[in-house]
Amino acid sequence: MTYRVIEAEKDACAPPTIDAAVAAAWLVAFLRDELRTRRRIEKAVIGLSGGVDSAVTAYLCARALGPKNVHAIRMPYRTSSDASLADAQLVIDALGVESRTIEISDAADGYLRFEPDADARRRGNVMARIRMVVLFDQSAKLDALPVGTGNKTERLLGYYTWHADDAPPVNPLGDLFKTQVWALAKYLDVPQRLIDKAPTADLEADQTDEGDLGITYARADAILSRMLLGYSNEQLVERGFSASDVALVRKRVDGTHWKRHLPTTAMLSNTAINEFYLRPVDY
């Protein structure tokens, strides 16, 4: 299964499409195989933010493992939007999954009081990493596995906190562009409010992903999908994309390449883990 890029004249700058029904079935099978078959784990733990990515992940896990085997954890900071909590509750109510709300303000502020001048980016990174501490500890308590929620667009643009959003060992959405996640959300019948809302990390008032990135997800996905097929900047501009958008996307992809790799290991032997030594299934 792969995504399709529309190259008809009228759709020369359209984002990639996907067969949502096929994708959903494939991802449910993937989750069952990864958790039950390979790891012999029956339960999933998900950080439920109130956004569409974590909602789609919850819907897929509920199909794969059953709602009672899915634990949705809401982890607000004191400045988090009440709307985000309410939107997460819509998912909890619709699916009937297990849920818990764990406030992270005291944990984050316990460190940030030593760094009162930390800007929004640093504060957001602290919150994201504390949320992963919570998810991994809850997984140990529940004999469950943390399941990631990051999409392909965020991963390619480096729009996530390293060793936080990318930390869970299994990620069903990591090969789906944001626009494809929206399509999958519609197919899965995720509450429309979550699909329509502007994506946000919810770090400060009026903050949005697209505002931070300087480009809409639809335009970014259209450019990224073609970059991955080998189109040069010049070829993208020839097809109707603006030179500034292409340059912005290319710069973010090239500048965040390090975030998409495991920590670099100094190799002293021919059995360096993840450099040379792999299980047969890893080849």
Image (spheres, rainbow, N blue to C red):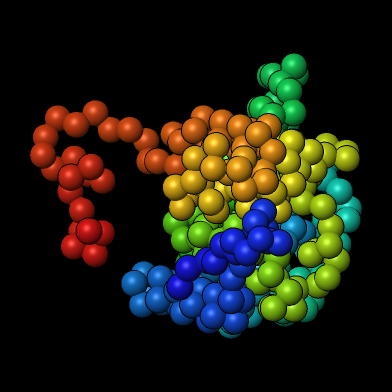
Quadrant of the image containing the N terminus: bottom left
Q: Position of residue 281 (x, y in %)?
A: 24, 64
165 left or right, relative to 40: right
Q: Position of residue 235 (x, y in %)?
A: 54, 42
213 left or right, relative to 161: right
What residue is at 75 percent from the left and 19 percent from the top? 116
116 left or right, relative to 262: right
Question: Residue 56 sits in which quadrant?
Answer: bottom right
What residue is at 24 percent from the left and 28 percent from the top? 266
Quadrant of the image containing the C terminus: bottom left
Q: Position of residue 81 (x, y in %)?
A: 86, 48
In front of the other: 258 or 57:
258
What residue is at 49 percent from the left and 40 percent from the top? 232
In front of the other: 212 or 248:
248
Looking at the image, which residue sits at the far left? 270
Question: Residue 191 sits in which quadrant?
Answer: bottom right
Image height of 154 relative to 249, above or below: below
Image height of 210 relative to 176, above or below: above
Q: Position of residue 260 (x, y in %)?
A: 45, 42
Looking at the image, which residue sits at the far top? 117
**Residue 261 seen in this snapshot:** yes
In front of the other: 167 or 76:
167
**Residue 41 seen in this snapshot:** no
Count how many numbered circles sit on residues in the image. Answer: 0
Image height of 62 relative to 183, above or below: below
What residue is at 36 percent from the left and 77 percent from the top? 37
